[in-house]
Amino acid sequence: MEYIEKLDWNKITNSHFIEFGVIAFIILIIYSISSLWIKKSNFNIDHKRRLTSNARGLFTFILVMTALLIWSNEIYSVMLSLAAIGAALAIATKEFLLCVGGGFYKTVARPFTIGDRIEVDGVRGDVIEFGFISTQLMEVGPGDLTHQYTGRSVNIPNSRFLDTNIINESFSTEYVLHVFKVPIQKDSNWEMHHKELLEVANLECNQYIERGERHFKKIANKRQVDIPSIQPRVNIKVIDTNTINLVVRVTIPSTLRGKIEQKIIKEYLNKVL
């Protein structure tokens, strides 16, 4: 704005307009003479039209360039002021624009939809509403320890989806490969714990294997990926010199993750304790 205030508007309206008027008058005279010459020439009609059109375009270009050269300093000052205003607006509305951009990304890429359970930047929950500015989750937790609602809703600005990984736990809607950990002491009985936990997992989840296999075959054919192994399994991960994690993976209905996990753990503890 400071540049605009410093402009000498009297000078613009007087000397510049007179200067532009004289040049425009000269250009108009030359254009008129050229048009008259073209009309009286012996060229055919099509050629005359092309020459007239080209002449009109050329003289219009010269007129515009003349105006730009005459008012170049003033135009430069105005453009600087507009650029400063634009930069200030961009800074002031940065977060809003990022939220709108995140909303557009979410609409086009569709990394999740309403009803999916997602985790974004440590926040985990079921999507209950999303718009172009924010997305609302019904929180599940704490963390990934349980699958129960905490009773709180969380609003996530859509800008977070542009720079944060989105974990979608409901990628396969009907059945999921559910993973959870059971820590045990690192001693000579670890093989017995492993065996008992695997037996319980097979007992609780065998009824879902056939339907789960059909579900994952359908997804594999649709997305051109390999079919995952869906049989219950228990992997071993050494945490430190005293602790081993038994990592359980089972194929179960997505709506029964929490219930079946708790059932497996309870049956396992009843056997080993």
Image: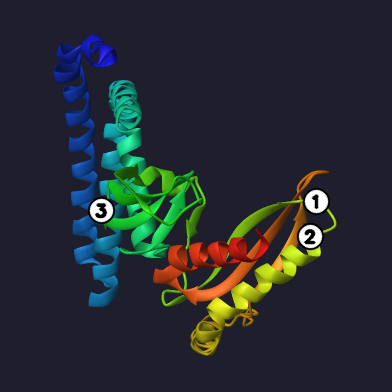
Q: Is residue 75 left or right of residue 169?
A: left
Name the front one of labels 1 and 3. Answer: 1
Residue 184 versus residue 223 in the image, above or below: above
Residue 15 versus residue 212 in the image, above or below: above
Residue 135 versus residue 13 in the image, above or below: below
248 and 212: which is toward the camera: 248
Task: Confirm whether residue 44 shows in the render.
Answer: no
Q: What residue do we see at 49% from left, 62% from top?
A: 262
User: Callout 3: helix, strand or loop?
Assistant: loop
> What residue would you read off at disc 1?
186
Where does the N terminus fall, quadrant-wise? top left
Indicate the position of residue 47 as horizontal and vertical percent values.
29, 73
Which comes sooner in the sequence, label 2 or label 3?
Answer: 3
Q: Are marks 1 and 3 in contact (CB under 8 Å)?
A: no
Q: CA distance from mark 2 to mark 3?
A: 50 Å
Q: CA distance from mark 1 to mark 2?
A: 6 Å
Q: Is residue 209 left or right of residue 66?
A: right
Where does the C terminus fall, quadrant-wise? bottom right
Which quadrant of the structure image shows residue 190?
A: bottom right
User: Callout 2: helix, strand or loop?
Assistant: helix
Amino acid type for the residue under numbered disc 3 = Gly
Indicate the position of residue 99 as horizontal and vertical percent values.
33, 44
243 and 166: which is toward the camera: 243
Indicate the position of residue 132 as horizontal and vertical percent values.
27, 51
Indicate the position of residue 148 as horizontal and vertical percent values.
38, 54
Q: What residue do we see at 24% from left, 62% from top?
A: 52
Task: Confirm whether residue 133 shows in the render.
Answer: yes
> What residue would you read off at disc 3?
131
> What residue would you read off at disc 2?
190
Coloring applied to the structure:
rainbow
Q: Are marks 1 and 2 in contact (CB under 8 Å)?
A: yes
Which quadrant of the structure image shows residue 129?
A: bottom left
